[in-house]
Image: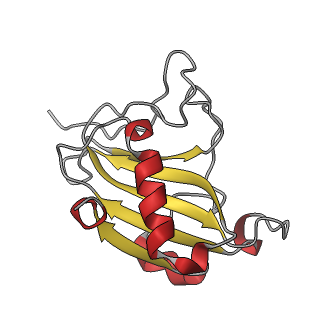
């Protein structure tokens, strides 16, 4: 029996003050979205974004709220160009695309992990090959940030 790709955004049943729902499968990577000109008023394609992708091991906690602040602190320490930028959201990929049992969803930084109306400001989650179309990006392994 073929596995079904998860196409419904995981949500928490009740608000817990966090930004992200607990994922139903192991997180494979997360991508932080930084608006480089948060006061510029640009939306979507008009805004300049910088992306930080973190590849994660299977053992990482599947609720990003548990390690979000530590990751954000490390990202900002390593990327001086993000001074003045705003982290507007994070896309979380979980499960396996090859096995057809995964998904990738964007969550706004809004303290509401029950909100299903979160949409990536770029229209859809951005892939690493497309970072240059917006303003750039970097990739890290989880162990590189948390050595």
- How many labels were placed on the picture? 0
**Residue at point 32%, 41% (across, down):** 5
Quarter of the image with the N terminus in it: top left
Query: In x, y percent, where is residue 57?
Result: 19, 52
Q: Residue furthest left?
A: 1
Color encoding of the figure: secondary structure
Q: 18 above or below 141?
A: above
Q: Nearer the viewer, residue 122 or 18?
A: 18
Q: 134 above or below 39?
A: below
Q: 82 above or below 44?
A: below
69 to the left or right of 56:
right
**Residue at point 81%, 68% (across, down):** 42
Which quarter of the picture shows residue 22?
A: top left
Q: Nearer the viewer, residue 108 or 94?
A: 108
Query: In x, y percent, where is residue 120?
Result: 61, 54
**Residue at point 22%, 37% (across, down):** 3
Query: In x, y percent, where is residue 133?
Result: 58, 82
98 to the left or right of 13:
left
Which quarter of the picture shows residue 84?
A: bottom right
Q: Residue furthest top?
A: 14
Quarter of the image with the C terminus in it: bottom left
**Residue at point 53%, 84% (across, down):** 132
Q: 55 above or below 95?
A: below
Query: In x, y percent, where is residue 40?
Result: 84, 70
């Amino acid at each position: 029996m073929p596995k079904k790709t998860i196409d419904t955004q995981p949500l928490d049943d009740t608000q817990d003050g966090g930004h992200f729902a607990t994922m139903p499968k192991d997180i494979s990577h997360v991508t932080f979205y930084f608006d480089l000109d948060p006061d510029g008023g640009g939306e979507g394609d008009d805004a300049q974004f910088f992306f930080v992708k973190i590849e994660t091991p299977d053992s990482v906690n599947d609720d990003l709220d548990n390690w979000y602040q530590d990751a954000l602190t490390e990202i900002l320490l390593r990327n001086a160009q993000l001074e003045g930028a705003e982290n507007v959201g994070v896309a979380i990929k979980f499960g396996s695309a090859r096995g057809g049992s995964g998904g990738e969803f964007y969550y706004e930084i809004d303290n509401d992990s029950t909100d299903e109306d979160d949409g990536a400001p770029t229209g859809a989650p951005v892939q690493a090959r497309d970072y240059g179309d917006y303003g750039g990006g970097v990739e890290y392994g989880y162990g590189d940030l948390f050595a």
